Amino acid sequence: MKYFVISDIHIFYTEMMTSLISNGFDIQNPDHKVIICGDAFDRGCETIKMFEWLKEMKLKDKLIYVRDNHEDLLEDVFRRNRITNIDVSKGTYLTIKHLAQEQRGQIIDDFDAMSNINTLLSDAYKTGIVQFLDESCIDYYEARNYIFVHSFIHTKYDDLTKNSIIIQSWRKNATQRDWASSRWTNGLSMSIDCGLRESGKTIVVGHYHTSYGHVRDFYGKDYSKVYLRSLEFEPNSNFSFWKENGIIALDGCVAWTHKVNCLVLEE
């Protein structure tokens, strides 16, 4: 089996397809599958193309879809039945508006959307997005040599070592609440700053831009966190894969770079 692993597409469908095709993905090839380490939705403008593609990929058994924080945010909106400022800033509101427009077959302006939230959410829900996410998303996917997650596997803070540690029984004992919390973790920091590894496996993560790792590889960790952070989005910052022993990070920050990293693995 050949896996094409991507993450943090954020509805930049065109950039995603460009990356998959340039790396040799063929939907007709029975040995090809796509693994998405989360964040398919929010922020971009190609919501419907992305949703239709995801449904097609699932129908053809070509998709492994790892749940992430943005899928959680999307479902949270429907549970609470209202839009918050966070939903707007994270791009979740835009996803919902696109879905509602598709259901109605017409453009919805923001004033109308915000004035009729219940109708907006009802129309978006009718597209089947929540059911699709519930039926398709998994917390992690494990292959022979790899673990695919959105940000990192479940950890906890250890008072004795004053550091984060991996919960050894995370496969069996991590609850949905644990996973929801883990999906906001900076996996690169867990590797670089905490030295965390999973024995015998490489953890493949998204969620946090790869320039975090490249900056620290180049400058070291002796500079202040504020200074290092300021270098992560310089014009020449590196957003390609970041690799270290036991971890591979994917998030190329597509909203900034307009590129989606695609990791090709054979098992």
Image (cartoon, rainbow, N blue to C red):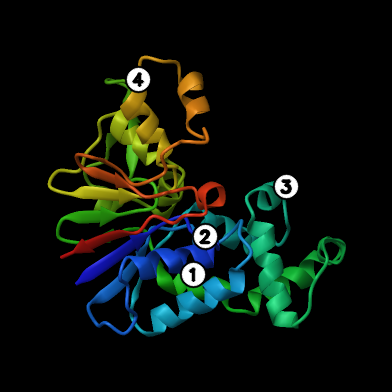
- Residue carrying label 4: 221
Which amino acid lies under the numbered mark 4 shown in the image of this protein? Lys
Element marked by disc 1? helix
Is residue 216 positioned above or below 30 on the image? above
Give the image location of residue 1, x and y in percent. Answer: 19, 72
- Residue carrying label 2: 71
Question: Viewer-proximal residue, 154 or 176?
Answer: 154
Give the image location of residue 84, x and y in percent. Answer: 72, 51
Q: CA distance from mark 2 to mark 3?
A: 17 Å
Q: Are marks 2 and 3 in contact (CB under 8 Å)?
A: no
- Residue carrying label 3: 85
- Residue carrying label 1: 133
Q: How packed is label 1: few (under 14 Cα within 10 Å), some, or many (20 or more)?
A: some
Q: CA distance from mark 1 to mark 2?
A: 7 Å
Q: CA distance from mark 4 to mark 3?
A: 35 Å
Give the image location of residue 261, x and y in percent. Answer: 39, 55
Is residue 226 positioned above or below 89 on the image? above
- Identify the residue at image location x=52%, y=36%: 235
Q: Between disc 4 and disc 2, whose residue precedes?
A: 2
Q: Which mark is residue 190?
A: none
Q: CA distance from mark 4 to mark 1?
A: 39 Å
Q: Quadrant of residue 91?
A: bottom right
Which amino acid lies under the numbered mark 3 shown in the image of this protein? Asn
